[in-house]
Amino acid sequence: MSAEILIALSALIVGASLASAGAVLQSVLRNPLAEPFMLGIVGGAALFAATAMHFGLGSWALVPAFAFAGACFSLALVCAVALLASRNGRAFGGETVILAGFVSGSFTGSLQMVLLSYAKPDTYAKLSKWLFGDLHSARPLSLLVAAILGTVAFAIMYSQNRNLNALALGDESAASVGVNVKRTVLLTLGAASLATAASVAIAGAIGFLGLVVPHFVRRVFGGNHRAYLPLSALFGGVFLIGADWIGRLFPAGVSAGVVCAVIGSPFFLYLLVLKRRH
Amino acid sequence: MISLENRTVKFGGIKALDGVSFSVGAGERVAVVGSNGAGKTTLLKELAKSGGSSRVAVLPQDIPPDLPLEAREYVMLGRTRFLSPWKRPSQEDEAAVTRAMESIGALDLAGRRMDEISGGERQRLALAMALASEAEILIMDEPVSHLDLRRKHEFYALMEKMPVTIVASLHELPPPVFTRAVLMSEGRIVADGPLADALSESNLVLAQLALPIDSYTPVGV
């Protein structure tokens, strides 16, 4: 298989996984700023995956498994902190959960740097490039594994599309129209972690795509999860292919993760202003 | 139809409900009245949980102003228990949604987005959503607190036409559309009965909703 096709496939899988995870996180936490990277899920997954690679456990099966463990761990930690810090039962709608996620992401980021300082020169270059979101290092087998995990995660999220719609009613009201709120929340958050892990395993840490793409899709096509989830996945893949292409226009080549951050961070600030003014 | 038996609920040592027994019969429209922290919301939550064999719908307390759904999709949320994630809503679901929207006079809103319409219209659609769920009992926590005077009376007029049992908490004295008033104070029910009886001067004082007459100081004395 040619390198170009591998890169395009990586971008599709990673973009679709991150965008659908972002869409689900925004709906479940009822927070327009929620996104796998800002919530520290990407950072946790990357730290665990990098640790596996460092100790020579970098096989096609172990890296995604470690990434998933890291993603679940970080998400649970951030949610627990937000719950502890809240008094009125609205733990996830505000900025606290984002702040907790950001700090958790910085913490795992620092540990990644510690890990890098122990790396041998040849693995240092590879590992540091991967940590900043690189689509060019995936191998066919790890790509296949990520594609399967991403598809499973998406199927779980999509199976909850009616319940995700009803969550907008608030917990009590959603329960009264037939949603098992706890089950839906746990299933979809687990699936979002799995999708994040799948993308981290092949492309490292890519942020803000899970923020920008769902907002665009919701604005243009509406928020009914029956269409919102698949369209987010589709546009996520397209967006990342575009980001990779833009990155290659620069003389030394800039990774797709960096392009996403350059586009996404101002958008995050814009949403923050919009949210505070509501 | 729906009832609580000697229910106590504590939040961090404070009793939000203190041994409350309460039941609602079919067709009643019950107003739960009390000052802040009297236990109204907790009472409604407990009622919603103890639905028993009757189907209960809880009116959403606030509808996000930026909800990116069309009005018809929003009313369809009431049908969630009947819908499959893999299929379109059935004809029966579509018919129930149309009926519910018709009964609140909002068919013309069907294609409008929820983030484009007024607060009063959103509140009416919340009612339609609850009706579409085919609930027998509607539970509403302060349904009119965000509405202006005119919208409020329109909402009450709609409520009167609904063929369902209603339990609503209010921040004000209930209008005659309610058949029964329950006064709460510090987690207990202090008065319960037809409007005219329950809302007597002495009961209002008991529920800390009015000051005793002799505590008023005439102006200028």
Image (cartoon, coloured by chain):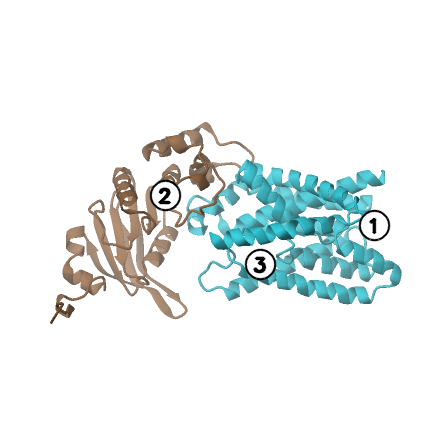
Chain colours: A cyan, B brown
Give the vertical position of B158 relative to B169 (above or below). above
Q: Nearer the viewer, residue B62 or A185?
A: B62
Q: Is residue B5 above or below residue B214?
A: above
* Residue at disc 2, secondary structure: helix
| Residue drawn at point x = 57 percent, y = 51 percent | A270
Between marks 1 and 2, how big is the CA–CA gap? Answer: 56 Å
Q: Which chain is mark 3 on? A: A
Disc sitting over residue A202 in the figure = none
Q: Residue beneath label 1, please?
A: A252
Q: Secondary structure at mark 1?
A: loop
Mark 3 or mark 1: which is in front? 1
Residue B16 % position (x, y): 34, 64
Q: Position of residue B183 (x, y in %)?
A: 24, 58
Which numbered disc, 1 or 2, marks the residue closer to the eye?
1
Residue positioned 33% across, 63% down in the render: B37
User: Which is more toward the observer, A209 or B80?
Assistant: A209
Residues behind callouts 1 and 2 on a single chain: no
Q: Amino acid at mark 2?
A: Gln
Residues marked 3 and 1 touching at CB (< 8 Å)? no
**In-image side of A73 versus B123 (left or right):** right
Where residue A168 appears, as percent x and y from the top left, is: 47, 46
Name the N-terminal-most of marks 3 and 1.
3
Residue at image mark 3:
A98
**Quadrant in the picture for the C terminus of chain B:** bottom left
Q: Distance from label 2 to label 3 (Cα)?
A: 30 Å
Whether residues under marks 1 and 2 lie with C-beta atoms below 8 angstroms apart, the answer is: no
Q: Disc 2 designates what residue?
A: B123
Instruction: Give me the chain letter of mark 1.
Output: A
What amino acid does circle 3 point to?
Answer: Ile
